[in-house]
Amino acid sequence: MTRLGPLTAQALVSFLPSHLLFSQDLPNHDSQGRSPYDDEVLRPEADEEPTSDSAAAAANSQQYDGRGRPVNPETRRMNRDMIRAHNEVMQVIGVAEPDTGPSHAELEATRRYIDYEEVMGHRLLRIGRALEVAGVWGVNGFRARILVYRRYADISFFDLFHHERAQRSVASTFLTGLPTFLAGHALKMATHFWTPLRRRRRMLSPVLAYIRVHLQLYVFMQRVEIIPASRWFPSWKFFVPGLPSSPIPAPAPPEDLSAASLLRYAGAWAVNALPFASFVLWGHMWTRVTSFLWQEFYGRLPNTVHHRKNLPPTPPAAVMPDIADDEPRPPADEPPQQHRDEVVEVPGQDTTPNTPLVRRQSVFSSRGDDFGSDDEDEGGISATLISFDVEATDATDAPPGLWSAELRPSAGADGGGGSGSGGGPAAPPIYVDTMLTRLPACLASDIFTVITSYVVVAPYEAMALRLVARSYRQSMGLPFDDIYEPNIFHSITWRGALNFVGIELLHLSIAGDLWAMVTLMSLVLHLTEDEFKEMDAAAAAEVRAAAEDGPD
């Protein structure tokens, strides 16, 4: 049967003469394109030792591999040596750079360095925010009393501290409401980190929010001296509406069960709950304003997130199974407030990382190391060793067809020539972006956000605080004539406004000093990658020395 198929073979047979069809002289191997010899390869016996003449003949004769392809080990060795020599020359003269990626050990060292920076940054961030809250705790009490009481409008700013010292002790000034605040903060942290509450956070979220709002209101009542500072925590009656200690007093009972009487009773409940609702609304407004302002401040303050360096990825564990991770990776600590310390994307602000550094195109040939592969044997040596930019010369008197070759440096680490021969502007610097390098910008954004938010929401805050204070005093049967009217435009004075501005400037001064202290700590703890590797190597050497001296 031929390649044309069975039908074509039958047709060809029909045209052959009969004496050829039935002849005994059938076509032999030569007529069919086959060799008359058998495909048998004779190999030397294992115990035979080749002589010198046979070895020389084998070296000069053509050799074949197991698949019948011609091979020549000597030529392959010479080509491999030539390519390696070319690579060394290109590296010495600085034309090219080797395309060698970072090793597994270097990636592990970089990962430990980034973990160190992140962990230390988160710890300092929590310390800085705790110091900020503690440093301005007494100032916030001053501010609340200035917004609520009339008598502070008659005292100059420089006499405020003498007045406060005469009214209360230093401990009472700076510690009033602190236990309740810490209890509310602990409840907030428990919802994020405690597993039983975290699993049921969606179901318990309204209940926990209700409790935390009451705790915040209790802190305010202690700051303005409506509730004594000696009562560290509120009783359970403070959380039940309608009870005497609750900020939502119960109205008079309905006269009868008619629809009109019940409607008036429900309206009385709504009116009594209005001060508490205004306080809750002020809290939501504060959260929205601070979230927006923090993003704006963080996007405009100088920080490393705008021009961050692309760090090498963490090597997968399957790449090097024989290398064990002796030191487990420490988990990055969770920040206390998730909406403030994350890297935010500011609208209109380019916070994406820059384009990765463009490496000079390497002219090294990688074929010298694995020159003996099957694909290379089939295709031969086809790697381009070096490339030239060839342009016509500028001289007009040069004969036609004359060309010159020039080696030009490709885009290096400066991002494209800088202000040199390219003529473009210099590229911005690239920074290592970690939590420790972002710490000054994060804390500064916190400070500017809090102070600016106090100024922005001050009108509504004053109205809500005055309404709550007057309502609670009235429900407790206490006088409330020394408290401002809820309408701030009828009671504003120049001295009161100056006292408010002075307190905010004092707040800024204290927070700025704390920021400088924490920033200095971050600069002391910050290390370059080379310094961290040296410290890591010294620590590893000490561990090895201790292990060697241990058995002795």
Image (spheres, rainbow, N blue to C red):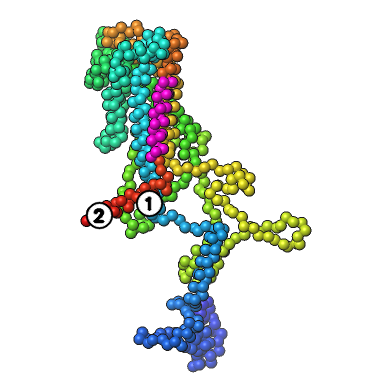
The answer to whether residue 364 is above or below residue 354 is: below
> Which circle, 2 or 1, is nearer the viewer?
2
- The answer to which of 3 and 243 lies nearer the viewer is 243
Residue placed at 73% from the left, 62% from the top? 401
The residue carrying mark 1 is: 108
Q: Quadrant of the C terminus?
A: bottom left
Going by the numbered disc 1, the residue's amino acid type is: Glu
Which numbered dot is residue 549?
A: 2
- Relative placement, left or right, of 393 versus 173 is right
Residue placed at 35% from the left, 54% from the top? 317
Residue placed at 52% from the left, 67% from the top? 85
- Relative placement, left or right, of 253 versus 40 is left
Q: Give the image location of residue 443, x and y in percent.
A: 41, 31
Q: Give the image location of residue 158, x and y in percent.
A: 41, 13
Q: Give the image location of residue 349, x and y in percent.
A: 51, 35
The answer to whether residue 131 is above or below residue 168 is: below
Per the rendered image, the range of residues in magenta is 505-525
